[in-house]
Image (cartoon, grey):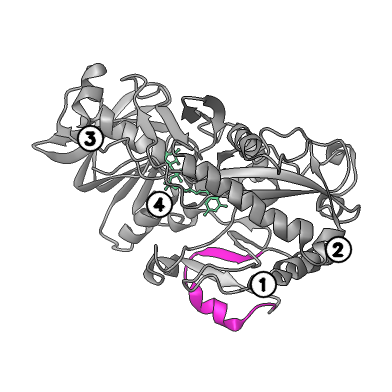
Amino acid sequence: MSRKDFDFIIIGGSTAGNVVAGWLAQSPNASVLIIEARKGNPRGETMITTPARAFETRGSEYDWAYKTTFIDRPDYTRVEKPNTRGKILGGSSCLNYYTWIPGSAATLTIGRSLVSVTYHDDEGLYSKDLAKVCKGGPLHVAHADLIPEMAPFRDALTQAWTSKGEPVSEDIYSGEMHGLTHCINSIYKGLRSSSYVFVEGKPNITILADTHSKKIIIEDGVASGVAVFEQNGEELIFCAKKEVIVSSGVFESPKLLMLSGLGSEKELVAHGIKTLVKSEHVGQNLLDHPIFPYVFQVLEGLGLEEHLLRAGPSNDGAPTFSDAFQWHIPTPPAGAWLTVIVDLLRPISQNGTVKLNSADPLVQPNININFFSNDLDIIAMRQGVRFVDDILRTGEGFKDIIGDDYPRPMPRNSDEAMNKMILERSQTGFHPCGTTRL
Ligand SMILES: Cc1cc2nc3c(=O)[nH]c(=O)nc-3n(C[C@H](O)[C@H](O)[C@H](O)COP(=O)(O)OP(=O)(O)OC[C@H]3O[C@@H](n4cnc5c(N)ncnc54)[C@H](O)[C@@H]3O)c2cc1C
């Protein structure tokens, strides 16, 4: 076992951890160590850098692929795998689905945080004002390309939306998120933008890849270092002269805190771990937002895959019909389709948990997202479906191009049957948070 010293140790080369590392390293005398469980060179991985391959990353070697309890109600339980989280330098920013939305003014102070990002509008299609939302940073974002053949679809959607009195807004980035919009994505010039850009080319950042944290070393009440395993099983210890920063994501961070003796005494004792800091919050308050996907047939010629993908055997069927969103809907053999996702952004079921399955650092934690533990969230989701239905099925323009539900009719006339379908089909919006409150 050997020891090495750094000023700062960042446990998890994550979306957030890399940004923090990049900031710390602006001070040329500061030495920063990043510990990452998997590869440290995402730029060489085309599955990561190619936007169209994003859905392939699910269940791949770059996915922690957590077994997760999604619903845990007295009348219905559902446990599934994989629940995706990124396992490579850049973390989930190497596997996510690109939508770049900073948040509303009520939840985020627009300003300082956005200087890490630069917006591009190379074709000059949008207001020049949008540039002020984010500029000067190393992470590049841009609006999604507008496929010309899909213009009739876009026009019909906009017509239906506005025919119901709903607003259109191209500036949901200055604080007020309300209205139909064209999305900005963390993609620029055909490549994924991930948080590893913050640590590239910085000589005072050391990246230790393929290394798994074991526990935080706490001496006299202060986090002074970390014990890790290398891939060959060798254990190493690193000491932090200034700070240890835990940024291993929403599931691994609370696990590491608990393995290090921070958490609920009852939970720690059950796994033979000595309690150093009692905190009932660690691993509690897990909150994610459930999404409910459902599918309509649309007129031939208006399906995205007809225009997005070249002909050929690997693209037969409906290849953009990804199971990342439609876990519970079979891929149709042919035809033109539209997937709607109703996303419950502010659920009131906020009592998910991350607990230990074992004191072994390599064993996955026990995750219970606990969607729909409060019935009001089911009602909200149902109302979301009715809102979208109203626009798509009766709105001007769109009502002429929309077809039947797929694969079976939405039971619109029965609240009870809709509740059942919502429970059976809803899944994660991939934005869990809240587990590391101390
Ligand atoms: C499939 C998917 C789609 C998404 N789509 C979007 C989207 O469109 N828009 C959006 O804004 N957000 C999206 N998100 C959410 C967003 O990507 C995440 O919220 C964010 O990246 C999480 O960042 P983080 O810093 O908390 O952790 P992560 O980026 O998840 O990083 C955790 C890091 O810690 C490392 N690590 C974990 N345990 C250990 C250990 N024991 N030892 C060493 N290293 C360890 C991991 O390997 C990983 O690199 C999506 C997420 C997923 C998974």
Q: Earlier in the sequence, mark 4 or mark 1?
A: 4
Residues marked 3 and 2 touching at CB (< 8 Å): no
Q: Which mark is residue 112?
A: none
**Residue that badge 3 annotates:** 280
Q: Earlier in the sequence, mark 4 or mark 3?
A: 4
Percent across and percent down for residue 401 are: 86, 58
Which three-letter amino acid code belongs to the residue tagged 3? Glu
Which three-letter amino acid code belongs to the residue tagged 1? Gly
**Residue that badge 4 annotates:** 16
Percent across and percent down for residue 88 are: 50, 40
Occupied quadrant, residue 320: top right
Measured Cα–Cα span from mark 4 to mark 2: 38 Å
Q: Is residue 210 visible?
A: no
Q: Which circle, 4 or 3, is nearer the viewer?
A: 3
Measured Cα–Cα span from mark 3 to mark 1: 47 Å
Is residue 136 on the magenta stretch? yes
**Residue that badge 2 annotates:** 149
Which three-letter amino acid code belongs to the residue tagged 2? Glu
Badge 3 element: loop
Q: Earlier in the sequence, mark 3 or mark 2?
A: 2
Q: Which mark is residue 165?
A: 1
Q: Which circle, 3 or 1, is nearer the viewer?
A: 1
Badge 1 element: loop
Q: Earlier in the sequence, mark 4 or mark 2?
A: 4
Measured Cα–Cα span from mark 4 to mark 3: 24 Å
Q: Which circle, 2 or 1, is nearer the viewer?
A: 1
Q: Name the side, left or right, on which 80 lies relative to 121.
A: left
Residue extent of the magenta highlight: 125-143
Indicate whether 303 appears above or below 233. below
Measured Cα–Cα span from mark 3 to mark 2: 55 Å
